Image (cartoon, rainbow, N blue to C red):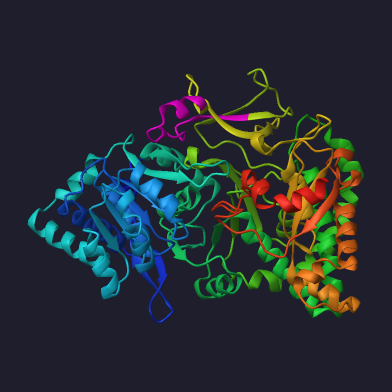
Amino acid sequence: MEQTVPKMLKDSAGKWPEIPAQYFKNTAGTFSFFTYKELLEKVLDFGAGLLSLGIKREENVGLISDNRYEWLQSSLGIMAIGAADVPRGCDASEKDLAYILAFADCKTVIAENAAQVLKIIGIKESLPALKRLICFESVGEDVARQCKKAKTDLLFFGDVTALGVDYRAKHPGKVEAELEKGTAEDIACIIFTSGTTGEPKGVMLCHRNFMAQLDELPERINLNPGERALCVLPVWHAFERACEYIILIQGAALCYSKPIGSIMLADFQALNPQVIPAVPRVFEALYEGICRAMRKAGGIVFILFGFFTDVAVLHTHIDRILFNKNARFKKTPQAPKWILLVLPWLLLYPLKLLGGLIIFKKIRIKLGNAFRGAVSGGGALPPVVDDFFAAVGIKLVEGYGLTETAPVVSVRPFYRPIFGTVGSPIRGVEARIVGEHGETLPAGHKGVVQIRGAIVMKGYYKKPDLTAKVIDKDGWFNTGDLGMLTIDNELVLRGRIKDTIVLRGGENVEPLPIEMKINESRFVFQSVVVGQDQKYLAALIVPSEEEVKAFAAEKGIAYDSYEKLLRNAEVKKLFDAELASLVNGKNGFKLFERINAFALLAKAFEPGVELSAKQEIMRFKIPELYAKELHALFR
């Protein structure tokens, strides 16, 4: 196994020089590609260009951009000369950038476009170390003037690459020698977590962290040379970064798309990919879109869809029980299960096959005829979505990790996914569950998930005290997540410590399972459960505007505005019924876990406001943002 990511790319380029490595949309809107040989040369050219500008080993280089082929070439070029990238997306606020780029002492910042250049120039006074900006796109004269006024050099990606070509001609083998100097302990990147608890923390990830994952992950998420993976995740996230390395080490191609339904489906047809990694929300949106399309079709199509989905889900549940594909916390005899369930399994199987031919085949075709499976990470996958994709014959596996673990801790393998889990820890990684007093808990007992292995970060940048709080003297990293281990060493997650709501009666409530259940309603787009130090739980709900308006039309409800519609008594009655049918004892919820009050919000939660960049609720912001609504819910 190679020691660094650029060495891994060099190895792949040696094995598969003419195979496509990166697909991207050209100016005509169609897809072009770079081969592995071309990608390596572009990485070396850009790295050499950075050397010509005086950028040195161990220097931090800002990288502010969304998904595009230049991002990877820049990141790998930075790493090839022993420097580290400090990435962030274009949605980063000026406040966040001022903190991150100053804290990381970035002298050079790479920016996607004029908007990002202006954003950085606008905070120049907060960035005393900043000397130069490198922009992927051309900018107007006004932007160039502002850079000059701010005494900041402005170069373009093409310029730096050209400098690199010239540098390599004058200094043969220099950039290649820098690449070979790289070691496993060199810092590859510093990713500042947007966080759900406040100030960003700079997670230092070294090449060892990433390369350790590549020892086994290709066995679980297998691709063949020349195959394609559709990439829609923010490229600066640890999850997308790791996915790209998993793809590159197998000689497959990265295909850049966007997590927008119409664009994704068009790109599926154009590229015919084998795999897509994405966050749960992408798969939720696909599921909701399919259900919405079937309801719209109506008549016999909708009836057949509902019938065959129910049959397929039931057969899938029975199949999991018979063949031990569920999370197991104790051993149970197999014979009674087979006596009870083998006949239903056999009777339902032909119906499941028929549904696959009549209904589900058409759904699978929309994802292309080569599609093999999907990987969900970055958040909890709702069970209803998990069940649906399994039932219709689309492999969807769930993984778990954190930025601090580079990020993959575990993932269900394509060849044998165990449902209700996020898979077993990858090779070389240990997981344990720790109780309140620091004791290691046996299988089936809930506690704090701790991880140890080569994937664990080097620490938080310039924050040794904070690092010591999460990594103990024996190397165990405290994830802050609650979970259990099964008897098969599969990991089951149960929420986060800091998310736990403590009611006035002393009951501890994990809000995430409740929110996931609420979100199963087709009338719900987003939800957050609240109730810290209160007598009961309540929920802030963002309805699905399309579904609520359809309900109003069906019931003949007149309204002047969407806001007024949400205050309508019939609509409130609808949500009362939805909550009662979902969060109840039948579905495994205790009495104190039920929702006693709710508020309907017209405006969706947004990244940077209520949501982190990973689409997770930043719960610490909710009391301030929704003080009025919370007061009304608990008065």
- Magenta residues, as a range? 449-469
Q: Is residue 332 magenta?
A: no
Residue drawn at x 84%, y 67% as measured from the top left: 306
Q: From the top left corner, tell me how far across and down residue 190 is, in percent.
A: 39, 43
* Residue in the foreground of this view, choosing between 183 and 583: 583
In the image: residue 137, left or right of residue 614:
left
**623 is higher (above) or lower (below) than 368:** above
Q: Is residue 585 above or below residue 244?
A: above
Q: Residue furthest left?
A: 170
Quadrant holding the N terminus: top left
Q: Position of residue 24 (x, y in %)?
A: 41, 70
Residue 446 in the image: x percent, y percent?
72, 29
Q: Which residue is pictured at 54% across the width and 55% down the height?
A: 608
Residue 460 in the magenta stretch? The answer is: yes
297 sits to left or right of 126: right
Up the image or down, 376 lies above or below 210; here it is below
Total numbered circles = 0
Give the residue displayed 56% in from the left and 51% down from the top. 612
What residue is rendered at 57% in x and 36% in y? 425
Q: Nearer the viewer, residue 286 or 559?
A: 559
439 with respect to 466 (left or right):
right
Q: Is residue 12 visible?
A: no
Question: Is 363 in front, or is 352?
Answer: 363
Location of residue 328 by image quarter: top right
Q: Where is residue 298 drawn, in percent x and y?
A: 83, 78
Q: Residue furthest bottom?
A: 28
| Residue 286 visible somewhere in the drawing | yes
Please state which of residues 120 and 487 is positioned toward the viewer in this rendering. 120
